[in-house]
Amino acid sequence: MKTAYSLFLHEYVDPASIEYDDSRTFQIVCAVCKEPVFKVARDNKGKTTHYFSHYKKDETLNSQCELRVNHITNNKIDEVRKESRNQKLNLFLKVFQDIVWENEYDEIGKRKARQYFFQLGGSQVLSTWLRVLLQGFRREMEDKENVLDMFDESLENIHGDEADFTSTYALNLRKEFAFEFLQYLLAGHSKTNFFFLFNHAYIKVLESLEKKRKETELLPWEEEMFNCMRKFLKTNNENKRMGLFNRMDEYKMISPYTHQEVDLHIMFGSYLQYHAFGILLRIPYFRLLKQNFNRKEVGKFDSSHL
Ligand SMILES: [Zn+2]
């Protein structure tokens, strides 16, 4: 069969995109009879065909399901995905702020982060600048492939409780979720969450510079960024804060990534972006879906869309 349905994701699944083990992890069943199916990849003269097959060896069942599965159109598949993604987005949004606090800091770190967070939230200078950043991101988001590439750079550590979900398919899905989440934040539906995310990214940049500083030493421009960011947090004076941003504007350097001349403020922006993406990618999407799945979905399969 060319498509099957994931009880876990509430979406149709394409056999070419998954690996054998994903069938169990994502609870993949026949879209018609709801019996578990597995993925088959068959090589024929150097060409691989991917499809799903019932575990039950029942020929009538097989051909009947096959016939009906073939009637599921791509439009239907897209429609179901869209609806299901919206529901997931709502689920993720509901717990987003709590999850970030829980996920990103240990108890000691959290206390410090709360102070920083409060400080940052009070700065008009920062929020004005973040609004400008948001405009730029909106343009960048139009190129999805480019954003997914940037995600790859931010994908450093995935937390242990998502250990079941380490296949390529799970990783790609995680990037899709993070992308859809980011799109939502950038569309301006949730400005509070956008500022929330970037204020945490600020704290994450500061933490990572602090860590590097302890372990080795910072490059001159990193030291300057670190100092500006720390001073920014230590004052409530918005003129001083503006002065610190100007200081970063005036600091010219060669970017170690693009090898072009940039100012420190731009580097600061890309560091924030890198860490914001990291936070979004580390959201335990699958754990949340699993909790939701265990709570309501066991034994119930909504076939109303078939
Ligand atoms: Zn079937």
Image (spheres, rainbow, N blue to C red):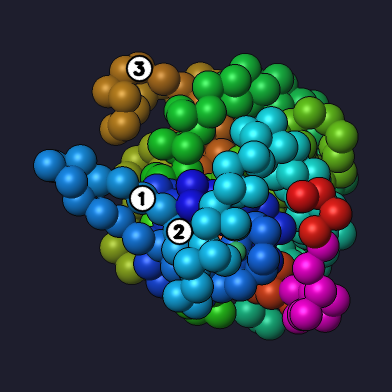
**What residue does disc 3 label?**
261
**What residue does disc 1 label?**
50
Would you say residue 13 is visible in this rendering? no
Cβ atoms under marks 3 and 1 closer than 8 Å: no
Say which label, 2 or 3, has the lower sequence index.
2
- SS class, disc 2: strand
Q: What's the residue at 86%, 39% (across, down)?
A: 190
Q: Nearer the viewer, residue 134 or 130?
A: 134
199 in magenta: no
Q: Position of residue 220 (x, y in %)?
A: 34, 41
User: For the residue with label 1, is its CB less than 8 Å from the closest atom of ligand 1?
Assistant: no
How far apart are the two marked residues, 1 and 2, measured between alpha carbons?
Answer: 7 Å
Three-letter residue code for mark 1: His
Q: Is residue 13 above or below residue 190?
A: below
Q: Is residue 131 above or below residue 270?
A: above
- Mark in front: 2 vs 3: 2
Q: Nearer the viewer, residue 185 or 129?
A: 185
Q: What's the residue at 41%, 62% (across, down)?
A: 39
Q: Position of residue 194 (x, y in %)?
A: 77, 41
Q: Position of residue 140 (x, y in %)?
A: 57, 22
Q: Is residue 83 left or right of residue 161?
A: right
